[in-house]
Every structure is written in structure tokens, then in C-alpha cells.
Amino acid sequence: MVEVVIDHRKTVTADPAPGGTGQQPPVDDEPTFDGPLYAARRKIYPQSVRGTFRRIKWAVLAITLAIYYFLPFVRWNRGPGAPDQAVLIDFPGRRFYFFFIEIWPQEVYFFTGLLIIAAMTLFLMNAVAGRVWCGYLCPQTVWTDLFLAIERFVEGDRRQQIQTDAGPWTAQRIARKGVKHFLWLMVAWWTGGAWVLYFADAPTLVWNLATGQAPLIAYGWIALLTFTTYTLAGHMREQVCTYMCPWPRIQAALTDEYALNVTYRYDRGEPRASVKKSEQLKLEGLPAGDCIDCRQCVNVCPTGIDIRNGSQLECIQCGLCIDACDNIMEKIGRPKRLIGYDSEINLKRRLDGQAPVQKIIRVRTVMYAAIIALVGAIMLYALLTRHAFDISVIHDRNPIFVRMADGAIRNGYTMRILNKRQEPRRFAVSVQGVPATVVEIMGLPLGSANIVEVGPDQSREFRVLVNSYEFAPPASTPIVFHILDLESREWAQTKDYFRAPERSR
């Protein structure tokens, strides 16, 4: 009988089987709460680490921050009269520009589609690899990584920081703290400054900010985002992920046993023992795991947890504990990936002596991918088939119709044509659906070709009178207003009704 210590809270008793390791999965005890409901924050000193996942995180950090900070300065030629900033949210002009795409206020459904795609992508990432968004792409993670790198550059790594903070306040300590916080504030300030550059021409706004000529609201937003970035990434760090962010709670309800998560493979790691003790246990025929209890996985964790305790709310799946453990396994000559991306089903299969399986394609992943593809296809179709102009028609409420002296039935409409381009356009207006009609646009000569002009990036309203000379038209007849762009030959139409007196029976 062997008592296996899993962690400070639980133990497992195992009987070694002939030819086996005698390893059993850890069993959770019934939780007890005998302390305060609130625990004061314990400062975490994450240790630097090198490895595959750390390199991936550096690459993601460099790419995402470069995009965020420098994208406002990328130019895109849209022709005369249009802004040449590649990505611009133009509130005064009521436009959103993204390279060759131009979104108008009437097309808010594109943003709805983007939100749906973003949500489904997040769900798909979770179904495949757990909280991979949190570990690599979340802004809180990216900026916290940057702030941690600055802290290590100025104050040294984990051990040096702990020793410094435990010692007295010397001139050197004050100087280093001051330099660190100054660099943090500079990063936070530029983060807020980069944000406002997406709402105006970036080079012009930078000059105005430097010379004190920018709008007051720009300085306000920069101050607000400087404060939030400095506070969240510099001071709150893991508390944002643990207490403020709702995604860990949502993610726990969306995952399943096939999702890959950063996992301590206890079937291989337990029972823990030092290298020398492990060799002694093996010579005595007793089970000995690969974990030497070096706690490197704990030291590098940005949230300060022990991954060997199992899946936890605080874990952001960043993979740094994998790198730390791999480095130790390489040094002592044991196989890597004692900690790795693994699924619950594979842990159970290995305990049962079965081969692990990877089941990325399953019902939920197919469903998420299908929703993404469907919404994306709808948005693409809407983008490719949309017009650079629009028409709307409102029928007069009172009177609904007028009988003229010559016997004609007249209906009045208010027609509005919207020109979304940066140059004036001419449109030919026609009406279909009611026979024997004469269309009159107020302000145009009667009998003209009903050609109207709308200025660049403007909407123009017209009063349209439709006269029907049919002897006895129906009380309600569908009518189609049709406009044709005389230059591009694009057309658009809208429907309404032509009203007439009820026919006598």
C-alpha cells in the first residue's frame, strides 16, 4: 500500500498492480470553508521562462501591439475628397473605413454580423483549445506581458524582485521603482494616444495633440485610457482575469471532455519525488512519477496557481508552465510534456491502458464553424451586392388621394435619395405598377425626363405626384419607385401603394 501525495489538500492510496504503476487518479475531498470569505491579494512574481509557448506569446505580442500602435498611420487612397487613412472611424462624416471597405450608418447590421462571428470564433477556440484566447490574444494578457517584461528589465527576475521588496527602501530601490512606473506610464499613455488616432487623421491629430490644439475630448480619452491601462496591466494583472472578467465562468460551461487544456498528466507524474528519491523508489519496486516537485510550473505562472492541482478558474492556458516543466525534464533526462495541452478523455484513456485520441471535429465545433461560415457568407453577399445609393418613399397620410378636375386620381409621396459617394450623381426616376400614370416631380418641368441630381455624400428630398388616368383603379395597388444611376447604370427600387376610392358594388 502506497500513499501518494497529490498536493497539500488531498492524498490518494494506491495498490501497485503486478506489472503496473499502481497509479490512480486524484480524488477531490469535500471542500470545507473555515477561513474568511475574502482573501487579501498576494503579490505574484512570475519568473521568466524560455520555450516554445513563450516564443509564441512574444510573437503574438509583437504582432498585435504593432498593429494597434501603427495601423492608424497606414494610408489608403480612396480618391479626391475622401480620407486616406486605412482604418478610420469618422464620426463627423458618419463613416467607418477599413481599407477598401466603407460602412455607412445604415449598415449597422455588418457590426452585428461581426459580433456574432467574434462570439462564435471565441466559442470555437474554447471547444478546440480551452482558454487559448485568454492565454495569447486577450488585450489584458498582451499588455500585462509587456508590463512584466519592463518590470524584469528594470528590477530583475523573480528572485531579485522578491529580495528587493523584502529589503529596506534604498536610493537604488526608489530609483528602479521610479523608472519602472515611468516606463509603464509611457506605454499606457501611448496606448491611450493610439486609440484616439482611429477617430481622426492620425498625423494631423498627433501634431494637434503635441501643440495643444486637439479637442478636449481627445485629451480626456487619452487620460482615461492611460489610467486604465496603467492600473489593469501594471497593478491588477491576474485579478482582472480572476475576478473582473466573466469569460472564465462562461468558458467552464462551454467546455467538454475533448477540449484541449493545459493539463498536468498525473498518470505519469505521481507520486512526486526528487530525482534521487525517485531512483531509490524504482530500485525498491515502488511507483515513482516524473514530477520532482521543483515548483517551476508555479513560479512561472502569471496567476500564481499550481497546475498540478487540476483545472482551475485562474488558469489562462498560456502554456508557460509547459515550457518550465519541459526545461526541467530535459535537464534530468526525462520525456517532455509532463504538463501539456491535453483533454480529460485522454487522461481517462491512459489510466485504462488505452491510446489517446484527438477529436477536434465534433458536433459543437462543426456547429460553431457552420455559423461562422453562414454569417460570413451573408455579410459577404450583402457587401458585394449593396448600392452606393439608396431610395426611400413615404406616402402622404392626409389626404391619401385626391380626385383631380380632369378625373385623374393623384397620390402624393415624399421621396428621399441618398448619395453615398464623394461625387455628385444624376438619377432617372420612374414609377411602375399603375397603368396610365403621369409622374410629376415638384421643381422639375412637367413632361421632363424626371432626372434629378444629388450632391456628393448627401441626401435630397423630392415631392413626387403620381396621377392615374385609369377609369376605375383598385383601392390599393402596389407601386414601384425605380431610380437609375445614369453613369454607373446601377439601379435601386422601393415599393409602396397607390390609393384610390373604393369601387362601388
Image (tube, rainbow, N blue to C red):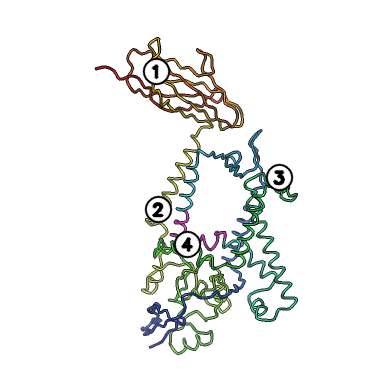
Residue at 45% across, 67% down:
342
The answer to whether 17 appears left or right of 378 in the picture is left
Which quarter of the rendered picture does the N terminus lie within?
bottom left
In the picture of the structure, the residue carrying the numbered disc 4 is: 246
Count of marks, rendered view: 4
* Magenta stretch holds residue 131: yes
Cα distance, mark 3 to mark 4? Answer: 38 Å
Circle 1/circle 4 CB separation < 8 Å: no
* Spatial separation of the CA atoms under disc 1 and disc 4: 61 Å
Q: Is disc 2 surrounded by few (<14), some (14 to 19) or many (20+) residues within 10 Å?
A: few
Quick one: SS at disc 4? loop
Residue position marked by numbered label 1 in the rendering: 402
Instruction: Give the residue type at disc 3.
Output: Thr
Q: Residue furthest left?
A: 505
The tag on residue 366 is: 2
Q: What element carries label 3?
A: helix
Name the residue nearer the viewer: 274 or 431.
Answer: 431
CA gap, disc 2 to disc 4? 25 Å
Label 2 sits on a secondary structure element that is helix
Neighbour tally class for label 3: few under 14, some 14-19, many 20 plus, Cα within 10 Å: few
| Region of the chain picked out in magenta, as a range | 120-139
Q: Please identify, in this view, whether the residue under mark 2 or under mark 1 is nearer the observer.
A: 1
Numbered disc in front, either 1 or 4: 1
